[in-house]
Image (tube, helix red, strand yellow):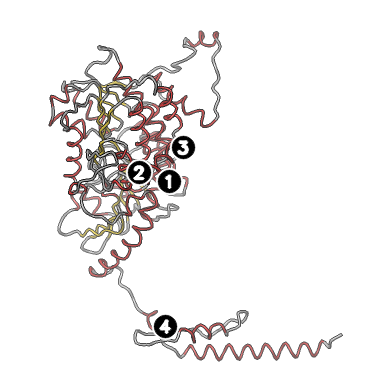
Amino acid sequence: MSDPAVEVKLEVKQASKEVKESENVAEKYSAMTVSKNSEMNMGELSSAFSAVPTHKPVKKQIQFVEDKQEFSRFPTKAGRRSLSRSISQSSTDSYGSAASYTDSSDDESSPRDKTQVNSKGSSDFCVKNIKQAEFGRREIEIAEQDMSALISLRKRAQSEKPLAGAKIVGCTHITAQTAVLIETLVALGAECRWTACNIYSTQNEVAAALSEIGVAVFAWKGESEDDFWWCIDRCVNNEGWQPNMILDDGGDLTHWMYKKYPNVFKKIRGIVEESVTGVHRLYQLSKAGKLCVPAMNVNDSVTKQKFDNLYCCRESILDGLKRTTDVMFGGKQMVVCGYGEVGKGCCAALKALGAVVSITEIDPICALQACMDGFRVVKLNEVIRQVDVIITCTGNKNVVTRDQLDRMKNGSIVCNMGHSNTEIDVASLRTPELTWERVRSQVDHIIWPDGKRVILLAEGRLLNLSCSTVPTFVLSITATTQALALIELYNAPEGRYKQDVYLLPKKMDEYVASLHLTTFDAHLTELSDEQAKYLGLNKNGPFKPNYYRY
């Protein structure tokens, strides 16, 4: 056996040697001062640090001259420009490609300035790059996997061609999910021409894929206002092609046809509208006695309100904010303007992640719902100086004004989850005293003269479809509803629908829901004859009266 006393002496000797080596290394580098004029041999630096024993701490600290540099609270104007350029370049690559291939193109020329031809020799379209069609096709195929109900409807009705002879002009978001709807309408016999309802939401590769199969698409991501109306006009005004059905999202297409092409508008057999803004416009026309065609209000159908508006926004609000700002939600003071179905979805998601959420409302019923769900109901002016994030979802205009934006604190985020870009008074921010600085795609710093910055997302347009994506399954529900509404209006016998705005029949709502239950392997209970008689219902539905609130 070895002598314990000898072992102790050896360990003490070794420890002393290691401490001496550590001190030598520390002294060597404590004398070094890193400055702009100094040069270091990286090989020597690496070998020197590797000589320090990992289990013995070096007590002397290394000091750097540049560590003492103080930074001003707000960078200079020149500094802001250089910083934004460096951030923008890197973050566009990492964030823009996350949702779509759309932002990866370096071609900044306008599609209006070039002629493109698809493989069939047609040039009746205007998209960013027709060569992206193959990539767009793969995105559409992915979307089809989670839109089984719409695909099922396509297979069931394809042989009957219920839309044979229908010439549908559409103005919606052009995404992979919308493409599945458009291809379903084509499979059911319709001819389609399509444009985008939002200048930022188009997936360029999907637009290319649709153009490749012969759908006349006029849309690309990042259109100007002039481009937007030009695209709508090209869809409507095509020699030898007379539209007879409209599928609209926001009412811009309907408004354009009504104003610019009144004779064409009078020949329309039906309008299907899916947004709060568009439906409001239709009711205004109807009230003024100027609506000369029947219209279907899909927005207020149960399948749209309770699924697209609520569940879709519950997931996509987080996605949009994370992708654009990397914001942490826990503890943030957030105000959601409006507690309708969109507002409810946003609030539920934000509350679940620990945000402190307050609500603004004009409707006492919605306000009471917010209170019962545990939210404070406030006036925006009462909390404007403390709020970190404002989200609008009212369908109204000037919900957030310039005066309120002036009083927001540095670093606040403002965004919109409503369809229209009127909710935030963005126009008032385009003044000489304010500086606009692009950070990354769809993210702008609005800089006040004192250096305060407010982050504006998507220039006040719809956040989720402008800055991220939305759940495919929920869009399948809406798309199926839209398809059935078009079939109903197009095939309805004369006199069933007058020149007014109609809600989707309850039976149709229930049918859309039943198509999607198979995804969850859900099994409905069937009423017995006795039970059906007791309730006064048909065994096959509808199961609720039209006035029922789900």
Give, as a three-letter code, the residue at label 1.
Answer: Leu
Q: Nearer the viewer, residue 8 or 538?
A: 538
Residue 346 in the image: state x and y as whole percent: 39, 42
User: Which badge, 2 or 3, comes first in the chain's sequence?
Assistant: 3
**Marked residue nearer the N-terminal end (1 or 2):** 2
Q: Where is 418 relative to 165, above or below?
A: below
Residue 336 is labelled as: 2
Q: Residue furthest right?
A: 1
* Secondary structure of the residue carrying numbered label 2: strand
Of pointers 2 and 4, the one earlier in the residue sequence: 4
Q: Are marks 1 and 2 in contact (CB under 8 Å)?
A: yes
Whether the residues at callouts 3 and 4 have beta carbons within 8 Å, the answer is: no
Is the C-beta separation of discs 4 and 1 under 8 Å? no
Image position of 228 (left or right of 96)? left
Point out which mark residue 350 bears. Answer: 1
Would you name the residue on which mark 4 appears? 64
Question: What number is the disc on residue 145?
Answer: 3
Q: Position of residue 134 (x, y in %)?
A: 36, 45
Mark 1, secondary structure of its residue: helix
